[in-house]
Image (tube, rainbow, N blue to C red):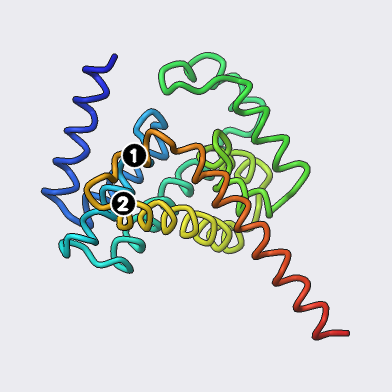
Amino acid sequence: MSGLLAGLEGWLTDVVYSFGYAGVFALIVLQNLFPPIPSALILPLAGFLVGQGRFSFLPVLLAATSGSVVSALVLYALGRRLGQERLRRFVVRFGRFVFVDESDLNRVSGWFERCGGMAVLFGRLVPGVGTFVSLPAGFGAMPIPRFVVYTALGTAIWNGAFIGLGWALGARWRLVQQYASVPQYVVLAAAVVAVLWFLWRRREKRG
């Protein structure tokens, strides 16, 4: 298994070095559709290359976020076309090939039922939810413009945080993958605080 992971890391690194921003875009699309590919490796590597002067922060953030939105729209379309019951049967039958099971679908469906559109925004920041929250948004017929805006905001926060960590760590960027769960929850907590502050400020102005 360690050899497989090392080979995957080497391949991802080669793609980013060889194809630049287009490589980051393509890998993020692939990562969201095939979750075993770790974004916690792709994004910090991109951040390291920002520090090396090979990338600029805003273009690489745009490339990563565009990849996230494109893959999210693919999953949205899948959910919209299949509907909840057909999608559930599909996951039960074929989900194991992409490391997805029925419990993953239940979790993201529960999030969407409780939180509605905000689940698309905050779900991007929650481990095990972000990739698949597009499915219930699809079979729930969430308006596409709102879906795209929430997806872009949520993934921009996520991508920016992990690119920034890679930039800050420099040659030690691989540490982000080892401790990925820590920044995931830090990013989520920071986003929640920011939204609460924004809502409080808007209420104060109206008052």
Q: Looking at the image, which residue sits at the far right?
A: 207
Q: Which amino acid, mark 1?
A: Leu
Q: Which amino acid, mark 2?
A: Leu
Q: Residues within 10 Å of mark 2 (few under 14, many from 20)?
A: some
**Residue lying at 50% horizontally and 39% vertically, measured from the top left:** 131
| Picture coordinates of residue 175, whole percent (x, y) | 34, 39
Considering the numbered disc 1 on the image, is that residue within a helix, a strand or a loop? helix
Give the position of the N terminus as an image quadrant.
top left
| Picture coordinates of residue 88, whole percent (x, y) | 61, 23
Per the image, the residue denoted by label 1 is 175
Q: CA distance from mark 1 to mark 2?
A: 8 Å
Q: Looking at the image, which residue sits at the far left?
A: 18
Considering the numbered disc 2 on the image, is that residue within a helix, a strand or a loop? helix
Q: Is residue 108 above or below residue 43?
A: above
Please tell me in which quadrant of the rendered image residue 121 appears: bottom right
**Residue lying at 70% horizontally and 43% vertically, measured from the top left:** 112
Q: Is residue 174 above or below residue 69?
A: above
* Observer-nearest of 82 and 39: 39
Labels 1 and 2 touching (C-beta < 8 A): yes
Give the position of the C terminus as an image quadrant.
bottom right
Asked if residue 90 lies left or right of residue 113, the reply is left
| Picture coordinates of residue 26, whole percent (x, y) | 27, 47
Per the image, the residue denoted by label 2 is 169
| Picture coordinates of residue 78, whole percent (x, y) | 51, 38
Label total for image: 2
Q: Earlier in the sequence, mark 1 or mark 2?
A: 2
**Residue lying at 51% horizontally and 23% vertically, measured from the top left:** 100
Q: Residues within 10 Å of mark 1 (few under 14, many from 20)?
A: some
